[in-house]
Amino acid sequence: MSYVKIWLHCVWSTKNRTCIIPQSFRPSLLKHFRENAIEKNIVLDYINAHEDHVHAIINLGKQQNLSTVMQYLKGESSFWINNQKTLPCHFSWQDDYFAVSVSHSHVDRVREYIKNQDEHHKKISWDDEVELFLKRYGFERISG
């Protein structure tokens, strides 16, 4: 038997980073993410949404790949959101996302960070957070 722990902190935003996820809709959205993850055999350890993005910590299974997991979470959820007809316009996620590995010893710290997104974004904007991620993890912007 193989034993695998591949913790990933994943972040994705709404299309054009539009602030379109109302506070009142977030509990049902997060519940849907969790239910969909269970159906797809994705270990979604913790997830939280803000008005224009989502943070999640995922334990990637030994036969899973990040691209497929993100497609399952983002693609299915945008389909579900649009079928709910609760938002004022067509909904979609940005194509791209951030994903970084997390040491098992830091999982609790990342959970707390994800849990406190509303409070966190009173101090730092999403644009500033993106720049921080780019710098902290050595990502480079690629112009297309």
Image (spheres, grey):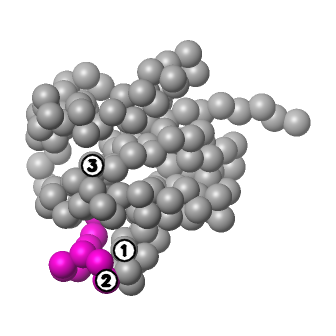
* 3 or 2: tag closer to the N-terminus: 3
Residue at left offset 50%, top offset 59%: 31
The residue at which mark 3 appears reads as 50
The residue at which mark 1 appears reads as 81
- What amino acid type should be assigned to the residue bearing mark 3? His
Q: Is residue 59 visible?
A: yes
**Mark identifier at residue 90:** none
- What amino acid type should be assigned to the residue bearing mark 2? Lys
Q: Quadrant of the N terminus?
A: top right
* 3 or 1: tag closer to the N-terminus: 3
Does 131 sit above or below residue 94? above
Decide if residue 11 is on the left or right side of residue 1.
Answer: left
Which percent across, then down, holds residue 38?
64, 58
What's the magenta region? Answer: 85-94
Decide if residue 68 is on the left or right side of residue 113.
Answer: right
87 in the magenta segment = yes
Residue at left offset 19%, top offset 63%: 20
Kind of element beneath mark 1: helix
Question: Quadrant of the rendered structure where residue 59 is?
Answer: top right
